[in-house]
Amino acid sequence: MNLLKGATFTAGMAAILTASPQADAQVRPWGPDWRSPGWNSPARAPVSDRRHRDAREGRVDVNRFVVAGADLGHGPVSVESESGDGPWIGETQRAAYEAAIIDSLIGAGYETRHTSDENAQVVRLKISRRVLAPAEEKRNPVSGSAAMSVGTYGSAYGLAVNVDLTKPRPALLSTRLDARILDKENGKVLWEGYATIATREGDDGWTDSRIAGKLAEALFDNFPEAENVIPADAPQG
């Protein structure tokens, strides 16, 4: 009897070991293979592109006007800067823009050291700043999402966590430099222009000196040529 039971047990084990994979899949109590695509799909938290660069950052826009026949680009010239209410920047900051304009005037052929001559011309500057885009608000650096899948033989729960350690971006500022060249004797405007640039507030790469240099360079590029020519007899406001 014991021999008969042993033979029966051996035959049963052989049948189990030689069973097909399909049959094995049918008797799994936990359902589909956890490695299958249906179970290998945890929820993924969307990654937002908060650090994309604003297309306006660092771009210089310039517009210039010149009176036809104006005698420009030589002789003595003095530089003055103005301030006022609202967006105009203070005297300390204006010094960087005056220095940049003086360098550009020297490069254009002017004499900036002896300005007492009655025939000297005067360059008057205004520098203003305004907010193009406010600073971003503080946000939760950790976010996530969850999803649940239910199958014939069971269910699965997926959790995804998104960690964003980037700092909120500071305000985007527009700095504008206006320059007018006038005849010192009669006060007539001979040339004028303005240039603007957008930079991030507090950006170490965009100091006042660098911003001033960029704007002054754009204003006096190919001086005294300008995009707009005003007739010599046109009335001035």
Image (spheres, grey):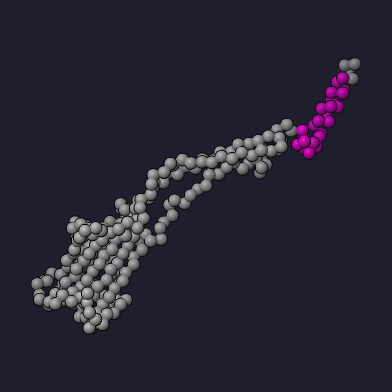
- Quadrant assignment, res 138: top left
Kindly identify the residue that appears in the image at 43 percent across and 54 percent down.
52
Q: Report x, y in % for residue 227.
A: 32, 76
- Quadrant assignment, res 70: bottom left
Q: How many marks?
A: 0
Kindly identify the residue that appears in the image at 38 percent across and 61 percent down.
56
Verify whether residue 11 appears in magenta. Answer: yes
Kindly identify the residue that appears in the image at 23 percent across and 69 percent down.
179
> Is residue 155 placed above or below 124 in the rendered structure?
above
Q: Report x, y in % for residue 226.
A: 29, 76
Confirm whether residue 154 shows in the render.
yes
Confirm whether residue 217 shows in the render.
no
Where does the C terminus fall, quadrant-wise? Answer: bottom left
Task: Please give the range of residues in magenta.
Answer: 5-27
Kindly identify the residue that appears in the image at 41 percent across and 61 percent down.
55
Magenta segment main secondary structure? helix
Whether residue 92 sits left or right of residue 169 in the image: it is left
Q: Report x, y in % for residue 26.
A: 77, 36
